[in-house]
C-alpha cells in the first residue's frame, strides 16, 4: 500500500549520489571534505552522510538499481559478443539466426484492429496502424531475445558482485522474534490493515518456522493514515507485548484480519491476558508515541509503501513472495560474516 507522496523530491539527492559515484580523481570528495559552512560551523561530507544516512538511503538504493540494470545490459552485450565470436558471426547476424528467425509473423489485420480498440485514442486506426505494428514487433523481438539471453547465460559463468547499499536500522523498542545475534536479521515495516502486508504474512510465518536459530524477524509499526484501524492494532500488539504475548497477538492480527477495538480486546482475552491491564493500555493510548516514532523512522528512510523489508540492511519493497524472501535470506550467510553489519543501536 503506497504512502502519500513525499513533499520533497529525491531527485536532488540522487544527483548528489551520482556525483559521489563518479570515477575517483585527485579532487574527489572524501569524508573530511567540507561541503557547507553555516555561520562558521563547517560541515564535512562524512558528518553529513553519517547524520543523514537514513535520508540518503533511498537515493543510494535508487542509484544502485540504475547501476545494476546498466551492468546487466553490459553483461548481456559481452555474452552476445562472445557467442558471436564462437559462431564466427557478427552480433547482428547472431540475432538474425537465433532471435529474429523465431519471432512470429506479423499479426493479422483483425488482430491489429482488436489492439487498436483497446487504446484510449481519438486518432483513426489508419493513423496508428504502423505504430501499433511496430510496437507488436518490438515486444515480440524483446521476448525472443530475452529467452535467448536466458539460454546463453545459463551456459555462461556469470558472477555479479555489485554491492547493494545497506541501511543501519536501530532496534530500540522493536519486537524481535529469534536471536538478535542471528546471522540474518529481517526487518519488516508494515501496517496490520494493509492488504499487501496481509498477503505476505503467510510467507513470513513459514520462513519464521524454517529458519529458527538462523534468522531473526523484527517488526516496525508503520500504520498508514488511510487505514483507520491500523494505529490501534499496532498499539494493541504492543500492549500484548507488555504481557509477554507480542508475537502471539501479532500473528493473530494477520491471521484473523479483525482490527476493530472490540476484536482487539477479544484477542487479548483468547490469549489469557490480564483484561484490565490490556484495556487500560489500549484505551489510554500509552503505546501511541512508540508507534509514531517507528512510523517517523519509515518516513526518514524514504519508504513509499508497506510492506518494506531490510534483510541485513538490504532493501526490498512490496508484497514479496515466499521464494523472493527466501532467496534474499539465502544470499546472506555467505556474506554476513564479511559484512560485519551493525544492526546497532541499543538492542
Image: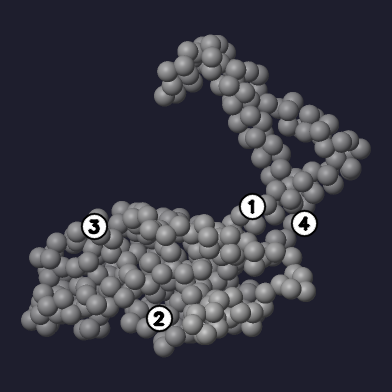
Q: Is residue 325 left or right of residue 196?
A: right
How packed mark 1 is, by other alpha carbons closer than 10 Å (few <14, some 14-19, many 20 or more), is few
Q: Are marks 3 and 1 in contact (CB under 8 Å)?
A: no
- The residue sitting at 74% across, 47% down in the picture is 76
User: In terms of sequence position, does the residue under pointer 1 or pointer 2 come before the other?
Assistant: 1
How packed mark 4 is, by other alpha carbons closer than 10 Å (few <14, some 14-19, many 20 or more), is few
Question: What secondary structure is found at the residue carrying circle 4?
Answer: loop
User: Which of the labelled discs sits on residue 304, or is there none?
Assistant: none
- Residue that mark 4 sits on: 157
In front of the other: 178 or 74: 74
- Residue that mark 1 sits on: 69
Q: Are marks 2 and 4 in contact (CB under 8 Å)?
A: no
Q: Is residue 115 left or right of residue 76?
A: left
Question: What secondary structure is found at the residue carrying circle 1?
Answer: helix
- The residue sitting at 77% across, 56% down in the picture is 157
Q: Quadrant of the C terminus?
A: bottom left
Against 43, residue 253 (above or below) is: above
User: Which of the labelled discs sits on residue 227, or is there none?
Assistant: 3
User: In terms of sequence position, does the residue under pointer 4 or pointer 1 come before the other?
Assistant: 1
Q: Quadrant of the N terminus?
A: bottom left
Amino acid at each position: 500500500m503506497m504512502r502519500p507522496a513525499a513533499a520533497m523530491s529525491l531527485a536532488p539527492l540522487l544527483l548528489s549520489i551520482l556525483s559521489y559515484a563518479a570515477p575517483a580523481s585527485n579532487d574527489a570528495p572524501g569524508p573530511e571534505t567540507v561541503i557547507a559552512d553555516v555561520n562558521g560551523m563547517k560541515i564535512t561530507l562524512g558528518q553529513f552522510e553519517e547524520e543523514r544516512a537514513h535520508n540518503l538511503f533511498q537515493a543510494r538504493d535508487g542509484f544502485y538499481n540504475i547501476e545494476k540494470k546498466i551492468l546487466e545490459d553490459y553483461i548481456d552485450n559481452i555474452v552476445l559478443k562472445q557467442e558471436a565470436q564462437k559462431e564466427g558471426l557478427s552480433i547482428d547476424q547472431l540475432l538474425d539466426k537465433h532471435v529474429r528467425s523465431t519471432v512470429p509473423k506479423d499479426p493479422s489485420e483483425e488482430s491489429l484492429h482488436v489492439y487498436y480498440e483497446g487504446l484510449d485514442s481519438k486518432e483513426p486506426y489508419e493513423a496508428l496502424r504502423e505504430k501499433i505494428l511496430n510496437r507488436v514487433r518490438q515486444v515480440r523481438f524483446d521476448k525472443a531475445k530475452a529467452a535467448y539471453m536466458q539460454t546463453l547465460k545459463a551456459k555462461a559463468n556469470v558472477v555479479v558482485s555489485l554491492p547493494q547499499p545497506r541501511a543501519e536500522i536501530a532496534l530500540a523498542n522493536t519486537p524481535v522474534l529469534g536471536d538478535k545475534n542471528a546471522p540474518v536479521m529481517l526487518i519488516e515495516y508494515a501496517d496490520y490493515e494493509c492488504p499487501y502486508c496481509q498477503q505476505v504474512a503467510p510467507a513470513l510465518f513459514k520462513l519464521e518456522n524454517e529458519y529458527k536459530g538462523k534468522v531473526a524477524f523484527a517488526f516496525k509499526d508503520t500504520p498508514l493514515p488511510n487505514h483507520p484501524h491500523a494505529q490501534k492494532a499496532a498499539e494493541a500488539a504492543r500492549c500484548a507485548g507488555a504481557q509477554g504475548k507480542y508475537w502471539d497477538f501479532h500473528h493473530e492480527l494477520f491471521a484473523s484480519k479483525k482490527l476493530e477495538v472490540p476484536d482487539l480486546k477479544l484477542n487479548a482475552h483468547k490469549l489469557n491476558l490480564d483484561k484490565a491491564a490490556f484495556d487500560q493500555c489500549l484505551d489510554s493510548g500509552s503505546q501511541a508515541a512508540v508507534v509514531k516514532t517507528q512510523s517517523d523512522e519509515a518516513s526518514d528512510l524514504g519508504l513509499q509503501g508497506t510492506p518494506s523489508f531490510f534483510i541485513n540492511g538490504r532493501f526490498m519493497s512490496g508484497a514479496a513472495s515466499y521464494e523472493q524472501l527466501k532467496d534474499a535470506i539465502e544470499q546472506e550467510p555467505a556474506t554476513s560474516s564479511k559484512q560485519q553489519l551493525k544492526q546497532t543501536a541499543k538492542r
